[in-house]
Image (cartoon, grey):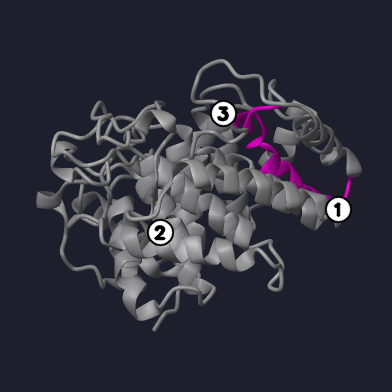
């Protein structure tokens, strides 16, 4: 009977949206997609497909996002196979970050190491991360182009590195990690956050000049990248889940998170997803899953932790989750993911997948399953 229900659910998923408005079912209240059994099943299916189809260096930033989703899958399902896979990751990498001690991308994988350390309590699982972050703090950033004027000079870095800092604080009790995290985060915030739009520019190349010149979308709007802002929100909730409730800087992060959340739900499209470029959706047909997955994850987390109003935000999360499921094929492959890049692009379809898109989907599922049932 359980198998029949699961097969039925997969069939229904295949019948709804393919991330385009005209194929989206408008019934966003159906309970199927929100049952615990279904969510666990689709998460395992997506995780297992992606694990069988690896891509990129295992310590690459792409896999940093993916393995964050794999850890969330283990937390949700308690699958022994998933846990063994996570431990194998650490054994293969010797619990080491990637090559560049100074680059946020290359420590993203450390989030998973620290999460596993909290379960295993073996110092060798976090010592390489501690040593790398110490070098990062002690040394200036080796600039290679004009955008690199601060250590976290691109907005996606706020997913890669800040959760590493807050997780290290939680693992070690050393508050210096929080102090430096505040310093570097606020440098990025001051440089790239638009106070009117409540969104982050990707980097200095996407800020307009005082005379209004600079890169703009076809409709004349500023360029705000869906994935970049999705990763900022994902990083914020991963920080907030570890920051102490009485931490003096916590109100700053909570306000930023709530301001972005309110802006983001206003930019959700009719099909439940967000476009690669947030302010020019008409130029970017088709939803983009890596940005949309992180928005779904972050908004659901806010509801679950009573930071966001359930009545206001729950419909948006439900709509997004149903649509995200429509982007998972019968094999468990998560499609409609924009390829690697640093700005909004249109060169993707249902056949485009990336490990970070799967990671975003898995993280979304790990919070959607916790949503209030009534």
138 or 373, nearer to the observer: 138
- The residue at 75%/35% (across/down) is 90
Q: Mark 1 to mark 2: distance in Å?
A: 30 Å
- The residue at 14%/34% (across/down) is 218
Most extreme residue toward the top is 144
Query: Disc 1 vs disc 2: which is toward the camera?
Result: 2
Query: Image quarter for residue 240?
Result: bottom right
Label 3 element class = loop
Which residue in the structure is indicated by mark 1?
A: 172
Which residue in the structure is indicated by mark 2?
A: 260
Residue 231: tell me if it is visible. yes
Q: Position of residue 17 (x, y in %)?
A: 20, 51
Establish if 265 lies above or below 55.
Answer: below
Which residue in the structure is indicated by mark 3?
A: 149
Establish if 300 lies above or below 46.
Answer: below
Quadrant showing the N terminus: bottom left
Q: Position of residue 328 (x, y in %)?
A: 33, 45
Which portion, as a residue range, is magenta? Answer: 102-122
Quadrant showing the C terminus: bottom left
296 or 155, nearer to the observer: 155
Most extreme residue toward the right is 123
Q: Earlier in the sequence, mark 3 or mark 2?
A: 3
- The residue at 25%/31% (across/down) is 213
What type of secondary structure mainly makes up the magenta span?
A: helix
Label 1 element class = helix
Q: Earlier in the sequence, mark 3 or mark 1?
A: 3
């Amino acid at each position: 009977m359980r198998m029949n229900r699961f097969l039925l659910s997969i069939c229904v998923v295949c019948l709804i949206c393919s991330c385009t408005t005209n194929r989206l079912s408008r019934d966003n209240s159906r309970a199927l997609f929100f049952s615990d059994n279904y969510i666990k099943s689709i998460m395992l299916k997506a995780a297992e497909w992606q694990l069988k189809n690896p891509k990129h260096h295992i310590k690459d930033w792409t896999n940093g996002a993916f393995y964050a989703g794999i850890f969330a899958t283990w937390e949700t399902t308690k699958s022994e196979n998933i846990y063994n896979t996570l431990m194998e990751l650490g054994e293969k990498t010797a619990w080491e970050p990637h090559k560049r001690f100074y680059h946020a991308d290359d420590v993203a994988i450390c989030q998973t190491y620290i999460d596993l350390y909290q379960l295993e309590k073996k110092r060798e699982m976090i010592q390489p991360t501690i040593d790398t972050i110490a070098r990062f703090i002690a040394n200036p950033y080796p600039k290679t182009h004009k955008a690199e004027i601060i250590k976290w000079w691109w907005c996606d870095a706020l997913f890669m590195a800040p959760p590493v800092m807050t997780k290290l604080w939680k693992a070690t009790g050393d508050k210096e990690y929080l102090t430096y995290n505040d310093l570097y985060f606020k440098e990025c915030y001051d440089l790239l956050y638009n106070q009117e739009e409540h969104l982050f520019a990707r980097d200095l190349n996407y800020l307009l000049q005082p005379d209004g010149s600079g890169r703009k979308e076809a409709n004349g709007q500023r360029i705000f990248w869906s994935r970049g802002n999705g990763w900022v929100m994902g990083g914020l909730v991963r920080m907030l889940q570890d920051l102490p409730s009485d931490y003096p800087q916590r109100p700053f992060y909570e306000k930023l998170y709530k301001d972005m959340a309110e802006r983001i739900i206003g930019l959700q499209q009719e099909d439940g997803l967000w476009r690669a470029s947030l302010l020019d959706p008409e130029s970017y047909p088709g939803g983009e899953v890596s940005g949309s997955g992180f928005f779904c994850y972050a908004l659901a987390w806010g509801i679950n932790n009573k930071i966001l109003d359930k009545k206001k935000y729950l419909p948006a999360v439900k709509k997004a989750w149903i649509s995200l499921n429509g982007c998972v094929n019968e094999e468990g492959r998560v499609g409609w993911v924009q390829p690697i890049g640093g700005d909004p692009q249109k060169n993707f379809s249902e056949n485009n997948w990336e490990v970070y898109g799967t990671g975003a989907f898995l993280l979304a599922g790990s919070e959607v399953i916790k949503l209030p049932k009534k």
